[in-house]
Image (cartoon, rainbow, N blue to C red):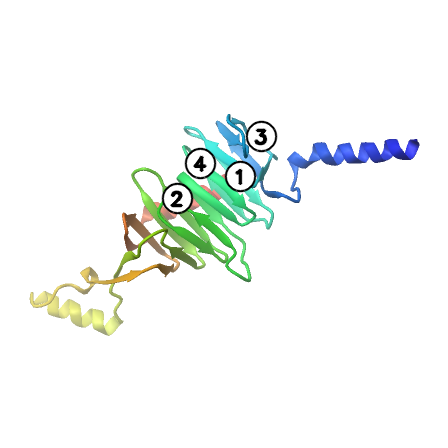
């Protein structure tokens, strides 16, 4: 009888402690909350207020309100910051769907490209990197600070536009010719190709408009964004 009581207490302890730490089926734990943050559990019809240390499982969705954000700690110690007015759904251990809004990802380095983020405009494959995805109504962008990511089209091919990269000598010659008004400046020239997927390198961002993907260099505002997100963790 005594052994049975001890076993029962042990089982109950495991049951009630599961929401506040990583369980076998958990994909993340909410490590920080600021403002109004909600969770819509898989199969539920109504969202409820999220709490710190709450487990996020397959099919759960995190929803942030105005001037609010949430930080998720993944099982491999990676971090995801979900900014205000955003919706992020967990599809599997290393598969997330950013349905709306803006989020920062700092993903631990992996041997294989297992981590994926699906957005309304592309699927991002991650090996280990730091990047920001904006899938708000007005902006559809991906900005990569470090590492490498693969960007894959959801439907038809991307019309990928990249600025022409020249050597120092070529750039000098183009600049000299441009001074005489004979040649177009090299920094305005673009390569255009049609691809199902492409690789984004550090220090670059890509802006999406329908099937057009235009690669651009970082701006000062982006550097400030990365700094801000790091401070949120």
The residue carrying mark 4 is: 87
Residue 147 image offset from top left, x and y in percent = 45, 59
Q: Quadrant of residue 9?
A: top right
Which one is in front in this view, the residue at disc 4 or the one at disc 3? 4
Residue 225 is marked as 2
On screen, 102 above or below 131?
A: above
- Specify which label sits upstream in the sequence, 4 or 3: 3
> Which residue is at the far bottom?
169
Q: Are marks 2 and 3 in contact (CB under 8 Å)?
A: no
Q: Secondary structure at mark 3?
A: loop
Q: Residue at x 54, y 54 (%)?
A: 108
CA–CA distance between discs 1 and 4? 12 Å
Q: Are marks 1 and 3 in contact (CB under 8 Å)?
A: no
Residue 59 is marked as 1
Residue 85 is marked as none
On screen, 3 above or below 189?
A: above
In this image, 55 relative to 87: left or right?
Answer: right
Q: Are marks 4 and 3 in contact (CB under 8 Å)?
A: no
Q: Secondary structure at mark 2?
A: helix
- Specify which label sits upstream in the sequence, 2 or 3: 3
The residue carrying mark 3 is: 51
- Specify which label sits upstream in the sequence, 1 or 3: 3
Q: Secondary structure at mark 1?
A: loop
């Amino acid at each position: 009888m005594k052994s049975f009581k001890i076993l029962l207490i042990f089982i109950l302890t495991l049951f009630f402690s599961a929401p506040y730490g990583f369980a076998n089926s958990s994909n993340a734990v909410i490590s920080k909350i600021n403002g109004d943050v909600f969770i819509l559990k898989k199969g539920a019809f109504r969202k409820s207020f999220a709490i710190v240390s709450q487990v996020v499982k397959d099919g759960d969705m995190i929803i942030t309100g105005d001037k609010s954000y949430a930080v998720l700690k993944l099982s491999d110690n990676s971090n995801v910051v979900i900014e205000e007015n955003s919706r992020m759904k967990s599809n599997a251990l290393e598969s997330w769907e950013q349905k709306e809004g803006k989020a920062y990802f700092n993903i631990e380095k992996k041997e294989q490209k297992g981590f994926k983020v699906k957005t309304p405009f592309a699927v991002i494959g991650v090996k280990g990197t730091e990047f920001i995805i904006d899938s708000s109504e007005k902006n559809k962008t991906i900005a990569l600070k470090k590492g490498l990511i693969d960007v894959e089209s959801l439907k038809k091919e991307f019309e990928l536009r990249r600025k022409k990269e020249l050597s120092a000598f070529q750039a000098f010659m183009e600049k000299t010719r441009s001074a005489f008004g004979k040649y177009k400046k090299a920094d305005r020239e673009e390569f255009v190709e049609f691809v199902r997927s492409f690789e984004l390198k550090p220090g670059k961002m890509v802006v999406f408009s329908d099937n057009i993907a235009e690669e651009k260099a970082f701006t000062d505002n982006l550097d400030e964004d990365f700094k801000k997100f790091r401070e949120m963790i």
